[in-house]
Amino acid sequence: MLCSSRPASWFRWLPGIMVCALVPLPARAQSASAPPLDHVQFGIGYVADLPSMEVGGGAYAILPRWGGVGLYVDAKFQVSGPTHELSFEPDLTAEQLESDVGGSYIRTEGTWWSVNAALLRPLSPYFTLYAGGGLAHVTSYRLYDQIDRDLDVGFGGVAWVEDPRGTRYRPNLMIGTITRLTSRLSAHFGYETSPDGVTAGLTLRFPRW
């Protein structure tokens, strides 16, 4: 079994679990109703596209005019991946390894980043809907084994190498909600297509609402 530098699966889902745990908070922590939106609201915080992109940040602004309208932006990144493996070979591509070194192909993995923008529409003081999209980029890597151990390639007869043939930009579509938990804290939950995953996060809102 190959040694992996990727975090355990439970750790990668931890932000989403935290959000789910906080969802009942409005009923417990807020005895008074939220006031109507009558001034500009700003938010900034952590957001991820799970399980692929575990690190990211998002921000939004909501204007009170026209019943409430706003703009949301985010950037998300995958920090784990084959480049952290001892067997990663930075000086070869997949095509070069196949033609010059040889080996048996095992599987392909990709690492992602994305930037996005969306329109916001508050449906109530507690519930805001957003929809939009952006640009995602995937860098493709391939894993090979049965490599001659006498060659200075990879580690222990296996090697990860980048595969430019599978590296590309992709459009991303996203839809989700921002839910008011307290006068300062909101939960972020949604879905996006590139990579296919669940958007989850927490944001701080300014000023209090």
Image (cartoon, helix red, strand yellow):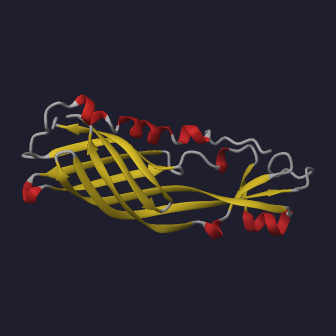
Q: Examine the image and state in which quarter residue 12 appears.
A: top right
Image location (x, y in percent) of residue 156: 85, 46
Task: Establish if 34 lies above or below 149.
Answer: above
User: How many marks on residues?
Assistant: 0
For residue 181, side relative to residue 143 (left or right): left
What percent of the width, then of the height, locates residue 136?
A: 46, 62
Q: Is residue 46 visible?
A: no
**81 above or below 33?**
below
Q: Position of residue 198 (x, y in %)?
A: 45, 53
Please name whichever residue, 82 or 180, is drawn nearer the observer in this view of the structure: 180
- On screen, residue 198 versus residue 186, left or right, reads right
Q: Where is 117 relative to 154, above or below? A: below
Q: Give the image location of residue 15, x and y in percent.
A: 45, 39
Tell me the residue at 38%/54% (across/down).
Answer: 190
In the foreground, 58 or 150 = 58
Which residue appears at 43% of the width and 36% of the height?
A: 18
Of 23 and 134, which appears nearest the observer?
23
Quadrant location of the C terminus in the rendered image = top left
Which quarter of the figure is the N terminus placed in? top right
In the figure, 169 relative to 121: above or below? below
Q: Quadrant location of residue 191?
A: bottom left
Residue 76 in view in this figure: yes
- Relative side of 42 to 78, left or right: left
Camera-side residue: 43 or 36?
36
- Left or right: where 30 falls relative to 174: left
> Which image quarter: residue 117?
bottom left
Identify the residue at horizontal 24%, vertical 52% (top origin): 128
